[in-house]
Image: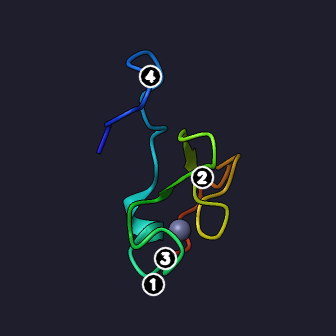
């Protein structure tokens, strides 16, 4: 998983709950950029999660 990744650049913390049904990241919540870095999946992860009121049914 971390093969080739910088040891000081761990994968960002993703919300697995949101990524569960995501086909983009296959439920990981993170995607690999062309640079080989981990980034939060733009399809299911939001850059800023200021939602204090959970809206998951
Ligand atoms: Zn995703």
Residue 6 versus residue 44: which sits nearer the camera? 6
Asked if the residue under mark 4 is in contact with the one under mark 1, i.e. CB atoms within 8 Å, the reply is no
Q: Which residue is mark 3?
A: 56
Asked if the residue under mark 3 is in contact with the one under mark 1, i.e. CB atoms within 8 Å, the reply is yes
Residue 25 versus residue 48: which sits nearer the camera? 25
Q: Position of residue 6 (x, y in %)?
A: 44, 22
Query: Mark 2 or mark 4, which is nearer the start of the sequence?
Result: 4
Asked if the residue under mark 1 is in contact with the one under mark 2, i.e. CB atoms within 8 Å, the reply is no
Q: Which residue is mark 4?
A: 6
> What separation in Å lies between label 1 and label 3 (alpha carbons)?
4 Å
In the rendered view, tell whether residue 2 sits above or below residue 43.
above
Query: Mark 4 or mark 1, which is nearer the start of the sequence?
Result: 4
In the rendered view, tell whether residue 40 sits above or below residue 37.
below
Give the residue at x 42% y 29%: 10
Disc number lying in front (4 or 2): 4
Query: Mark 3 or mark 4, which is nearer the start of the sequence?
Result: 4
Q: Quadrant of residue 3?
A: top left
> What separation in Å lies between label 1 and label 4 (alpha carbons)?
37 Å
> Label 1: few (<14), some or many (≥20) within 10 Å?
few
């Amino acid at each position: 998983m971390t093969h080739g990744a910088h040891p000081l650049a761990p994968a960002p913390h993703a919300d697995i709950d949101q990524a569960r049904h995501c086909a983009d990241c296959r439920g990981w919540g993170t995607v690999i950029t062309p640079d080989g870095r981990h980034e939060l999946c733009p399809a299911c992860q939001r850059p800023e999660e200021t939602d204090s009121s959970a809206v998951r049914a």
